[in-house]
């Protein structure tokens, strides 16, 4: 049972050399997906154990980071997603993702532009709260693209969906995030209501 | 303009991600130069991308996780059985503590020899320690109490370090998980009686609980 040690030693070293440099990236992704430290640690550990088990199937010369991220996202989808508690998660389909009417959207943008200095003051906590509200399918794509800079083609392979799906999830996901952040900013009074400005002027 | 604002929607996403090439890229860039609306959308998306990146990249895997993973890789190399065990155990962490303990008792016992052989601190024990518990007691400031106990005047002034003292006098430290954060920073809870549910973390120097749920009593 313990007989493979000599050869396994090098094999193990190679795996550790390739995989450990991505530990922080994998952990930060796992933390955003599971939304708590313990599950994130378990998810990362599962990912490494699986990756090690299938390491002989990894084609050397190809992108190891993409390969191990695929294992992370698959493990999350298959094993953790159902277990993570989802407090007051609203079904995405029921939300108007396009920030309501084009007219409203335009107004919102005007407000942002008028006060873009305030908009830049978005803190980490708000970004995280907005991400937490995003549905898993969108969140995965947004994290892979915006945080880890994987090209669309690689993301498509990771989630086993066509590139068109990657693009649409990305653009809808970002719109959702912007909407959450704008709502937050408005609640906090960072953005002055445009209507008030108008009534002053006219 | 060769491209309409509607067509730009998709192109903007791709432009932000550097996924456009050739004519498409030229047309999109030309549109942005002339269209304030689309340019605003573009700038906002770029800004969001940067914010996401800086927020999520500032997170580092804890050192104990590296150690744990290194160990589990070593163990899975030594024995395919241990690797299967790790999966069984971690899958069951999410079920009731009772079930996990029962499962451990049934599965681990006959193989306890094997664990001792393979490494000093085994994974089973580590995971076994992570049990789901509920503690009740009074919220206090751990640092202030420590100062008082040492005969000093205890004042953290603004930044208290809240914890819970149970009826046995044990002081529980809230690990800074998502739920834990809410209590740690809510000083209005000082001296209130509360029930905290979460995972008791292993460690001998203090009682740590990773907070999953809490309520005032
Ligand atoms: Zn336009
Ligand atoms: Zn204090």
Image (cartoon, coloured by chain):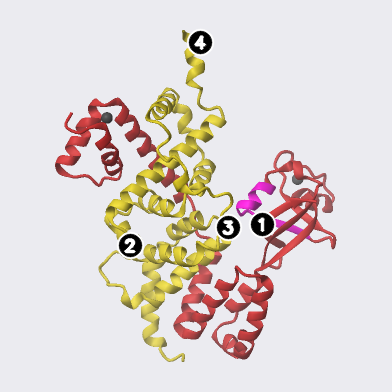
Q: CA distance from mark 4 to mark 2?
A: 54 Å
The residue wearing badge 1 is B211
The residue wearing badge 4 is A200
The residue wearing badge 2 is A160
Label 1 residue SS: strand
Q: Earlier in the sequence, mark 4 or mark 3?
A: 3
Residue A182 shown left or right of residue B157 in the figure: left
Q: Earlier in the sequence, mark 3 or mark 2?
A: 3
- The chain letter under disc 4 is A
Residue B156 visible within the image: no
Residue A26 position within the rendered picture, expressed as x and y whole percent measured from the top left: 44, 60
The residue wearing badge 3 is A85
Residue A160, above or below B140: below
Chain B palette colour: red
Residue B131 shown left or right of residue A96 in the figure: right
Which chain did the renderer colour yellow?
A
**Labelled pair 4, 3 in contact (Cβ < 8 Å):** no
Q: Earlier in the sequence, mark 4 or mark 2?
A: 2
Q: CA distance from mark 4 to mark 3?
A: 47 Å
**Outermost residue to the left:** B23
Residue B152, above or below A65: above
Residue at 83% x, 53% y: name it: B149
**Labelled pair 4, 2 in contact (Cβ < 8 Å):** no
Q: Same chain, marks 4 and 3?
A: yes
Magenta region: which residues? B171-183
């Amino acid at each position: 049972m313990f007989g493979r040690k000599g050869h396994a030693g090098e094999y193990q070293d190679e795996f550790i050399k390739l995989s450990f440099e991505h530990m922080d990236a994998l952990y930060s992704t796992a933390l955003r997906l599971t939304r708590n430290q313990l599950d994130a640690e378990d998810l990362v550990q599962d990912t490494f154990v699986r990756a090690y088990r299938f390491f002989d199937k990894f084609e050397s010369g190809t992108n190891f980071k993409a390969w191990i991220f695929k294992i992370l996202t698959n493990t999350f989808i298959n094993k953790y997603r159902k277990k993570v508690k989802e407090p007051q998660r609203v079904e995405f389909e029921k939300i108007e993702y396009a920030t309501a009417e084009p007219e409203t959207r335009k107004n919102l943008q005007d407000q942002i532009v008028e006060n873009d200095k305030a908009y830049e003051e978005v803190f980490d906590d708000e970004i995280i709260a907005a991400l937490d509200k995003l549905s898993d399918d969108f969140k995965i794509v947004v994290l892979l693209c915006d945080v880890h800079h994987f090209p669309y083609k690689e993301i498509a392979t990771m989630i086993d969906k066509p590139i068109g799906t990657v693009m649409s999830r990305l653009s809808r996901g970002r719109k959702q995030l912007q909407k959450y952040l704008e709502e937050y900013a408005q609640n906090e009074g960072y953005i002055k209501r445009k209507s008030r400005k108008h009534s002053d002027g006219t | 303009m060769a491209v309409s604002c509607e067509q730009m929607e998709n192109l903007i996403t791709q432009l932000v991600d550097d996924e456009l090439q050739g004519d498409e890229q030229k047309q999109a860039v030309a549109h942005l130069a002339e269209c304030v609306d689309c340019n605003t959308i573009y700038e906002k998306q770029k800004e969001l991308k940067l914010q996401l990146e800086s927020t999520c990249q500032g997170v580092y895997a804890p050192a104990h996780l590296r150690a744990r993973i290194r160990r589990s890789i070593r163990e899975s190399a030594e024995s395919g059985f241990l690797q299967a065990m790790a999966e069984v155990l971690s899958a069951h962490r999410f079920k009731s503590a009772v079930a996990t303990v029962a499962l451990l008792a049934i599965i681990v016992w006959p193989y306890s020899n094997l664990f001792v052989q393979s490494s000093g601190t085994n994974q089973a024990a580590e995971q076994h320690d992570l049990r789901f518990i509920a503690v009740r007691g009074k919220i206090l400031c751990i640092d202030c109490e420590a100062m008082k106990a040492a005969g000093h005047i205890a004042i953290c002034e603004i930044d208290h370090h809240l914890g819970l003292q149970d009826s046995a006098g044990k002081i529980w430290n809230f690990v800074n998980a998502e739920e834990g954060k809410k209590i740690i920073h809510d000083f209005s809870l000082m001296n209130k009686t509360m029930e905290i549910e979460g995972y008791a973390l292993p460690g001998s120097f203090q009682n740590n609980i990773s907070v999953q749920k809490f309520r005032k009593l």
